[in-house]
Image (tube, grey):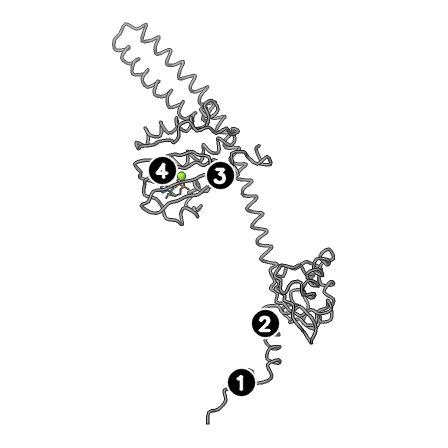
Amino acid sequence: MRQPPAPLFPESPAIALSSIARQSVAGIYILQDANFQYSNDTFAGMAGYNGDEVVGRPLRECVPPDYEAEVMDRYNRRISGEVKSMRFITRGLHRDGHVVYIEVHGQAMEFRGRPAVVGVGVNVTEQLLRDEELRQSRQEYRQLASYLNTMREQQRAEYAREVHDVLGGLLTSMKLDVGRIARRSRSSAIRGIAADLNALLVEAIGNVREISESMRPQALDHLGLAAAMASHLARFRERAGLRASLEPLDFELDLPRWRSIGVFRIFQEALTNVARHAKATAVVVRLRHEADDFVLEIEDNGCGMAAADCFEPNPLRFSLGLISMRERAHELGGELRIDSAPGQGTRVVLTAPIVSNPLAMHA
Ligand SMILES: Nc1ncnc2c1ncn2[C@@H]1O[C@H](COP(=O)(O)OP(=O)(O)O)[C@@H](O)[C@H]1O
Ligand SMILES: [Mg+2]
């Protein structure tokens, strides 16, 4: 004859379950008549007590005073049967007075024949504090990044002015003098040297203009974003030796200067990356409106990059370009997306609102 299977719980199931509850790593409690009828040591331990010390205590005494009404309301809604089960983060009062955060899942159930709430809780205080610290340090980092960008733009504008006015002015005077030498000298040897010097000076003046323009794009102020981009793209095409186009050429976008410079810097960095990393033969820059946003796309047909690099630029490699573009996008109230895969080219997409949030830092 076959033996009946050994019982799962050698003693009564109730004893086994209460032993499981006692040893559980999750907090377990039962509330009835707005008092704790049961608490295991884990749950009570979150407030600095052991299980027995909590039994019989009113629920309202175990939470911060300003939180009592909310806790009692939630309790009553379950006891009355209005809601069967609730999951939320609650505040509890620790024995030594500080507040603990507990994520609980409590259900309406019958206990000794009458309505009660039976729940499970996990202490999430540390996790919430860490989240808050992370949120704060992220906010500080954003403020710092934004401050540094503003300072950098101010410095660039100063250098651009110095380079353009002082250095450019000197070179232009030298060029005039070289012209005078050439006109006054009868020696063809000297006139030849003057002509060479003149050519060098023309080149130097061009370089100065280009350096000062890239530090503070005057075209942005005078001609608007699309025209400044077109003019930068024309120079880029020559220097990088690849096809580069802007679509459309006459895009209208009226942004305050600090915002248009932000968009322009993202555009510049994306192009620098194309020249430096992509091994591309063509790049297309597109501007368009999308509802209340504008969209800037810089797409190349180069070697592309791994998805991990698009989303987690590695600051240890000092590749801060992508991070800085993303921060600029954030400052503009928008976001930056990078679509890329090895061998598939790269598309950098900035989407930002046309009208900036009136509370934005620089508005
Ligand atoms: N258009 C692109 N094509 C291919 N790889 C790119 C492109 N843009 C960026 N990358 C890759 O992403 C990395 C990070 O770029 P970035 O943050 O601008 O740093 P950096 O240009 O200083 O290396 C680059 O080193 C490069 O490997
Ligand atoms: Mg870069």
Q: As rendered, which of 14 and 113 lies closer to the eye? A: 113
- Amino acid of disc 3: Ala
Classed neighbour count for the residue bearing mark 2: other residues with Cα under 10 Å, few (<14), some (14–19), many (≥20): some
* Tag nearer the camera, 3 or 1: 1
Residues under numbered marks 4 and 3 in contact, where contact means CB atoms less than 8 Å apart: no
Tell me if residue 209 comes above or below residue 108 in the rendering.
above
Q: Mark on residue 274? A: 4
**Quadrant in which ligand 1 is drawn:** top left
Q: Name the residue under label 1.
A: 7
Residues under numbered marks 3 and 2 in contact, where contact means CB atoms less than 8 Å apart: no
Q: Mark 3 points at which residue?
A: 329
State the SS at label 4: helix
Q: As rendered, which of 185 and 319 lies closer to the eye? A: 319
Q: Mark on residue 24? A: 2
State which tag comes first along the sequence, 3 or 2: 2
For the residues marked 3 and 1, what is the alpha-carbon distance in whole angstroms?
Answer: 65 Å
